[in-house]
Image (spheres, rainbow, N blue to C red):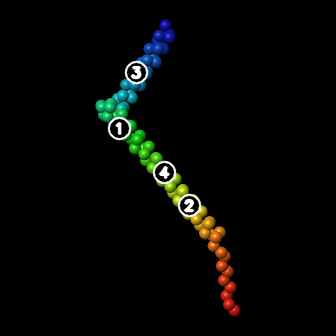
Amino acid sequence: MAGVARDFDSELLESVAVRRRRMRDAMLFGALASRRSYEENAGKVIASIVIAGVVAAGCVGYSSIRQQIAKQNQQNKSAPAIIHTPDR
């Protein structure tokens, strides 16, 4: 008999949690569940695009900096050292 009471209590607690979540979602997003899921998914898609753009910009910036450093190193190695001695 104690098992039945425990099951009833857990079911009651779960149903209360589900009701609270539904009420909170209705207050935050409105009554239309399909619209709510569309807005949530659209936000996730936009956030993913923004993150991908930031990562791509970082890769391009890193590549550009590495290319400039390599170019400078190559110029420094290939340029002859000019030593100017003043005439006396």
Which of the two residues, 50 or 74, is positioned nearer the viewer here?
A: 74
Marks 1/4: CA–CA distance: 26 Å
Residues at marks 3 and 2, CA–CA distance in whole angstroms: 61 Å
Q: Residue at x 38, y 37 (%)?
A: 40
Of labels 4 and 2, earlier in sequence is: 4
Identify the disc placed on residue 67: 2
Q: Amino acid at mark 2?
A: Gln
Residue at horizontal 49 percent and vertical 49 percent from the top: 55
Q: Residues within 10 Å of mark 3 (few under 14, many from 20)?
A: few
Which element carries disc 2, helix, strand or loop? helix
Spatial CA distance of label 4 from label 2 is 16 Å
Q: Of the residues tagged 3 and 1, which is closer to the observer?
A: 1
Q: Is residue 25 visible?
A: yes
Upstream in the sequence, badge 2 or badge 1? 1
User: Label 4: few (<14), some or many (≥20) within 10 Å?
Assistant: few
In the image, 19 versus 41, the foreground residue is 41
Q: Which residue is mark 1?
A: 39
Given this view, does label 3 or label 2 mark the residue nearer the observer?
Answer: 2
* The image quarter in which residue 79 lies: bottom right
Q: Which kind of residue does numbered mark 1 sit on?
A: Glu
| Amino acid at dot 3 | Ser
Q: Mark 1: few, some, or many residues within 10 Å (few <14, many ≥20)? A: few
Secondary element under disc 4, as helix, strand or loop, is helix
Task: Report the residue that reaches farthest toward the bottom.
Answer: 88
> Which mark is first along the chain, 4 or 1?
1
Callout 3 touching callout 1 (CB < 8 Å): no
Q: Nearer the viewer, mark 2 or mark 1?
A: 2
Q: Position of residue 75 (x, y in %)?
A: 61, 69
Structural distance between the alpha carbons of marks 3 and 4:
45 Å
Dot 4 and dot 2 residues touching (CB under 8 Å)? no
